Image: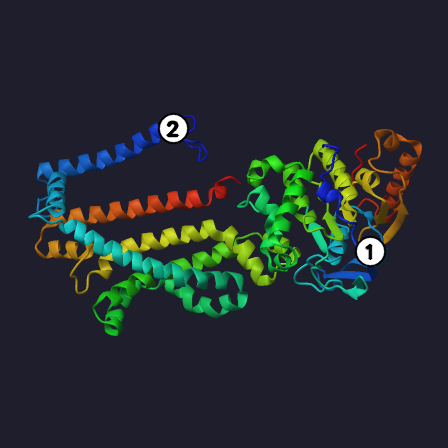
């Protein structure tokens, strides 16, 4: 990853202040044998500064469902949330929000479009065509392709790229919109260890150029500690907030920090909480 | 021979061509032997060389080509009907695939026709539309569109929901999701539906040209039959098969050029 950042990205003023509030969120799904299963139980969270916020929990704990409520596409066929409110900048949010863009684990890149057209895809939609003029969006696409290191691959299609490169395309498509809220749903979960490392470093770099509010869902304890300004640990079935702490160590956090006694103690504490909150359930990953 | 029973083994182009031509040659040989042996009378089964001669006769005789004129008429009807099938069938199929209410409304009208005896509709079409071009084109249209519409619907519904959700998340309206994400992803399968539609129309062309036959390959065959010129009947059938095959090959080639990404995944 090149250390220099393109000026056009760096020169953009930081995202406007924002506030995202989850208030007493409850999510229930119809249970197979009748009745309901509560998967999220009275979760309240408040995000009011740009930073990387990690939602950490075992797979299947409902953290993705929670993420989708923050301005993403809600699950189809059920009322979401079952109870509670989501407030973005003080007003209730009930569906896709213009200021929030999602990056999925299974990259939603279009196999029929080139890298350039995949990143430029949002500008085919009326919403973004009205907001951003053609000259500007073209420049933005160029800049973000440069920032994620895909300028040379602009003419290729997703099938001609590696998994990591595909996820760079997905990240670029989200950031080209300069969102105030970036929602990431286990975006690096399907990648191999080395590629995941690279992508984490890229995210750190991009976030420095565009300091938005990132809410990042993961079941990887190490990833949470390496990336997070704030780590929110969720229990499972139902999901409750088990812990919520900040990490002030500047990023990128070197291997020496990752191996330091305090870090290992923190990791121990998180794992303990997860095991207490959800004995024998779900899957966790530690990759130090 | 170790990969004889192996659906994933790729044959060398040369071997594939050799086997294919071998089968055709074997059939021609069997046909020739039957004709020479006298086991089947020449009036019932003309020899291959008689058919070839008939083909030459139809191709050029007394300063005109009956075959070319007939082919142009048939191809013209097929193209007009095909354009209508595409212009009317694809939008209906897309609407059915993308809007469950439209599907619920129209599928009882469309789906049963897939197994309806379309040929039996011919007299009804004649009664309604007369015996002119309108009737012939309407018949081809109905024959193909009843296959195409359900295929287009299925193509739309086969697009993974993730593309719809992805576009929705980026602020697309529901119609924009359909227009910008779902339809482009369904295009290769919609193209398959069009290819099937044209194949179906080639099989129906003789029926369409049966009534009040003035021009066309169907008329050519029917006319020959009336005079028991079986060599010309065979020649006509072979021309239709060849044209149908050429149409198919061309459309498959075109599809691969338009949607090269389909086979990459």
Q: Quadrant of residue B219?
A: bottom left
**Residue furthest to the top:** B1
The quarter of the rendered structure image containing the N terminus of chain A is: top right
Q: Is residue B75 above or below residue A8?
A: below
Q: Is residue A78 left or right of residue B202?
A: right
**Secondary structure at numbered mark 2:** loop
Q: Is residue B113 above or below residue A276?
A: below
Q: Which residue is mark 1?
A: A17
**Disc number placed over residue B12 in the picture, else none:** 2
Q: Quadrant of residue B54?
A: top left
**Secondary structure at numbered mark 1:** loop
Q: Is residue B87 left or right of residue A122?
A: left
Q: Residue at x 88, y 32 (%)?
A: A257
Numbered disc 1: what chain? A
Q: Nearer the viewer, residue A52 or B191?
A: A52
Numbered disc 2: what chain? B
**Disc number placed over residue A166 in the picture, else none:** none
x and y percent of residue A222 in the render? 81, 37
Give the Cα separation between the discs numbered 1 and 2.
64 Å
x and y percent of residue B138 in the render? 30, 65
Q: Nearer the viewer, residue B254 or B223?
A: B254
Q: Nearer the viewer, residue A253 or B95?
A: A253
Count of numbered marks: 2
The quarter of the rendered structure image containing the C terminus of chain A is: top right
x and y percent of residue A96 in the render? 69, 59
């Amino acid at each position: 990853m090149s250390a220099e950042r393109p000026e056009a990205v760096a020169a953009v003023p930081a995202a406007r202040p924002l506030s995202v509030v989850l208030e007493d969120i409850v999510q229930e799904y119809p249970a197979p044998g009748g009745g309901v299963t509560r998967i999220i139980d009275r979760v309240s969270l408040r995000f009011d500064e740009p930073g990387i916020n990690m939602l950490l929990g075992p797979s299947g704990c409902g953290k993705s469902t929670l993420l989708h409520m923050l301005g993403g596409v809600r699950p189809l066929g059920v009322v979401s949330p079952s109870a509670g409110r989501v407030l973005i900048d003080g007003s209730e949010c009930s569906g896709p929000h213009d200021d929030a863009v999602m990056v999925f684990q299974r990259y939603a890149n279009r196999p029929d479009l080139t890298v350039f057209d995949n990143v430029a895809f949002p500008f085919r939609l009326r919403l973004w065509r009205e907001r951003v003029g053609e000259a500007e969006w073209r420049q933005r696409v160029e800049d973000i392709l440069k920032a994620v290191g895909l300028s040379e691959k602009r003419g290729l299609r997703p099938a001609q790229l590696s998994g990591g490169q595909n996820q760079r395309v997905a990240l670029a498509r989200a950031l080209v919109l300069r969102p105030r809220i970036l929602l990431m749903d286990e975006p690096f979960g399907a990648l191999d260890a080395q590629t995941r490392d690279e992508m984490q470093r890229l995210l750190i770099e991009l976030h420095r150029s565009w300091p938005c509010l990132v809410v990042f869902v993961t079941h990887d304890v190490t990833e949470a500690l390496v990336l997070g300004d704030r780590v929110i640990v969720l229990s499972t079935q139902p999901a409750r907030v088990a812990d919520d702490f900040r990490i002030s160590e500047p990023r990128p956090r070197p291997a020496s920090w990752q191996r330091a006694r305090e870090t290992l103690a923190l990791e121990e504490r998180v794992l303990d909480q997860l095991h207490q909150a959800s004995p024998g359930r779900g899957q966790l990953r530690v990759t130090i | 021979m170790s990969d004889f029973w192996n659906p994933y083994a790729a044959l060398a182009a040369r071997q594939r061509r050799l086997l294919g031509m071998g089968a055709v040659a074997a059939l021609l040989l069997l046909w020739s032997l039957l004709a020479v042996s006298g086991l089947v009378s020449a009036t019932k089964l003309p020899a291959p060389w008689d058919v070839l001669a008939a083909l030459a006769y139809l191709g050029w005789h007394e300063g005109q080509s009956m075959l070319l004129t007939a082919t142009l008429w048939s191809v013209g009807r097929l193209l007009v009907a095909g354009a209508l099938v595409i212009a009317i069938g694809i939008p209906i199929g897309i609407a059915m695939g993308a809007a469950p209410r439209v599907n619920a409304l129209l599928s009882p009208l469309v789906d049963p026709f897939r197994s309806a005896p379309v040929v039996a509709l011919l007299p009804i079409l004649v009664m309604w539309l007369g015996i002119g071009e309108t009737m012939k084109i309407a018949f081809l249209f109905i024959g193909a569109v009843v296959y195409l519409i359900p295929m287009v619907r299925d193509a739309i519904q086969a697009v993974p929901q993730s593309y719809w959700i992805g576009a929705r998340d980026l602020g697309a309206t529901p119609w924009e999701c359909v227009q910008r994400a779902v339809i482009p992803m369904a295009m290769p399968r919609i193209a398959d539906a069009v290819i099937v539609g044209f194949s179906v129309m080639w099989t129906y062309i003789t029926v369409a040209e049966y009534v009040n036959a003035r021009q066309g390959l169907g008329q050519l065959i029917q006319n020959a039959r009336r005079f028991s010129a079986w060599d010309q009947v065979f020649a006509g059938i072979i021309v239709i098969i060849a044209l149908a095959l050429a149409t198919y090959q061309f459309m498959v080639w075109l599809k691969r050029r338009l949607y090269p990404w389909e086979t990459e995944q």
